[in-house]
Image (spheres, rainbow, N blue to C red):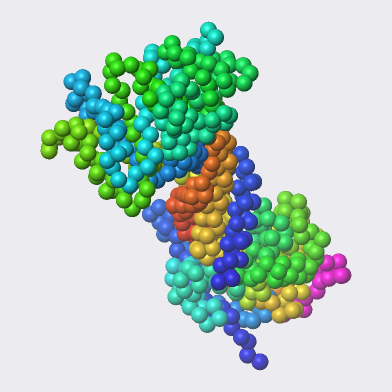
Amino acid sequence: MSNLNFKIIEGTRSAALSIFAHGFRSFLTTLGIIIGVASVIAVVSVVQGFSANITQQFDGMGTNVLNIESYTPRKERLQGVRAKLTYDDYLEIKYRVPGVSNVPPTVRIWGSNAVITYRGQSSSSMIVGTASTYQKLNTVYPERGRFFNLSDDKSRRRVAVLGPSIMSKLDIKGDPIGQHVAVSGEWFKVIGIAEKRGKLFGFDQDDFILLPFSTTRALLGGAEEPDIIVSLQVDEPSQLEQVKQHIKNLLRRNHKLSKDADDDFEIATADQMLDTFDQIVGSTTLVLGGIVGISLLVGGIGIMNIMLVSVTERTREIGIQKALGATRFDILLQFLIEAVFLCLLGGLIGLILGFGAGSLISNLTGLPSATVPAWAIVLSFGFSAGIGLIFGIIPAAKAANLDPIDALRYE
Amino acid sequence: MSKQTIIELRGIAKHYMMGSEGFYALDGIDLDIYLNDYMAVVGSSGSGKSTLMNLLGCLDYPTAGEYKLKGTDVATLDETSLAGIRNREIGFIFQNFNLLPRATALQNVMQPLIYRGLAPAERKQRAEDALAMVGLQDRMTHVPNQLSGGQRQRVAIARALVTEPAILLADEPTGNLDSSTTVEIMALFDQLHSDGQTLIVVTHEQEIAERCHRVITLKDGRLMSDQANKVPVKPLVSGVAAHV
Ligand SMILES: Nc1ncnc2c1ncn2[C@@H]1O[C@H](COP(=O)(O)OP(=O)(O)OP(=O)(O)O)[C@@H](O)[C@H]1O
Ligand SMILES: [Mg+2]
């Protein structure tokens, strides 16, 4: 209907005119919407940038990779019992489970045992003892030098791959390859430097030293068997469930668990970890949505208030328009367009401010850079327009229902 | 030659309740208005002239009686149809101009055409023509407070005429204007009348009433007299038409 189109175009023009005629007042009116939209966009942009980064990291792991870790239920943990995956568990998984390859064992040591020294400088960093296949599963590539190989592990060579942060912590100058660092008093030759990964949640992801697994075991001595994390790649993704079941049976038998006892280990896929992360993001978004809903509600009431004022101020004008032949619908449309226009303007300002704030937060906290997904933009504008419609309808109806002669006589 | 009736009023009354007392602003008005009538409405202040005009303009409604506009009983129409009548059949001119304050002269004149749903180009063309007719072709982009009183009233007249209404209602159109501007406006009305327009003009001024071809007098809401002006009309000031 072209008639309606002309009226909408005209309504938009006159809405813009009256909004900008009271520029500052319009700005104050939309402040609720601006703040609401800005806060959503700020948080969403940070979370999205962050989760894009996480997803990327998990993608590097591959979807057919399993991680098997010990898991101590809470009750036992309180009793001081600690579950463990032993070296024997690892060997059994590696040699007894069919259809898997690249099965690196990993031990992680941190705290007081994990001190690395170099020429009087020392650094407390995470020690990761693992096999050469770790590289394949975790896509860690050496920035310089090389990763350790099968023979390094077999011969328990004292070689190390450094995380880039250790370099600066130990103040290593010049070419680090070929230099020696001490780990728990034993000398290791640096053969490679890992790629920089940056910070996540303020944690330095580059503060580690990778050693061959057998060397690490030897380093720990026979005092206590370490708790091992076993990673592996399932050759046929369709066999994933069977492989998991196989490992589960095997470990339960090894650990002599009775039929009704819970597993004392966890088998996780990268997908599962990603799901968990998505759930966290999802519930954060939900809580945020609630907060924003309230602020938009307040914003909407502000809009309604000022629109009511505006209708009262323009009572005579409405009377004139009615005398010239404006129908109720014409007046309703005009004021609804004005309310929606006002809200969309607020939404736009909020979007810009929110993205600015998000980028600032990301920069200051070292999180990955903020991104605003298209759905957030659509949602912001949709919500703003909706607020305009919902809270504009009462003032618009009030204007539309004015009696022409009363409106014309209004002083 | 029989005259074509545009408006028929039968027993029209407008009753107001003021506290506990009732009050008739109009009381039993019977009146026929014909095509190309040029009618003055006179009467003392408070006699009900504006009340009558507002009823005729479908801005207000009578409390009793029947109002037929071009044969249609207005009381049977809904709000949207009434808006259509105000838009198409009635051109209303107010004493205080009632222009939209933020809109230019051109936009003011285009306004009624928006409600008719005309395309922008056609709106503009017709509004420009109407403004040219009242001699304001060089004031189109002025907003009301950049125009003199006489110019404002001419914008209002252009706005009333742009829809080519069946009847032009003017409630004291020159009440806020000085005498020379009054002459200009009345010359314009004379011109419209001779072009075939039907006009009803409320006035306090004897000179204006004398120019009209028919004069009705109200008193306390009643129709006291309805006379034809037999005297051939002379221009108020010679050469006014050329002046406008
Ligand atoms: N809304 C209203 N409520 C009550 N009384 C009203 C209302 N509107 C008009 N009146 C009364 O109706 C009577 C007629 O008013 P109207 O405005 O028609 O007079 P008028 O002839 O136009 O006078 P003037 O020449 O001063 O303009 C007046 O006494 C007025 O007080
Ligand atoms: Mg009056």
Residue at 48% over, 22% down: A159
Where residue A222 appears, as percent x and y from the top left, is 30, 17
Where residue A326 appears, as percent x and y from the top left, is 56, 64
Residue farthest left in this picture: A259
| Viewer-side residue, B71 vs A378 | A378
Where residue A253 appears, as percent x and y from the top left, is 18, 36
Residue at 36% over, 19% down: A218
Residue farthest top in this picture: A120
Inspect this view and state whether residue B131 appears.
Answer: yes
Left or right: where A193 falls relative to B166: left
Left or right: where A365 falls relative to A96: right
| Viewer-side residue, A65 vs A326 | A65
Where residue A232 appears, as percent x and y from the top left, is 36, 39
Membership of A95 in magenta stretch:
no
Residue farthest bottom in this picture: B1
Q: Give the range drawn in magenta.
A: B229-244
Is residue A287 placed above or below B38 in the rendered structure? above
* Majority secondary structure in the magenta region: loop
Inspect this view and state whether residue A392 appears.
Answer: no
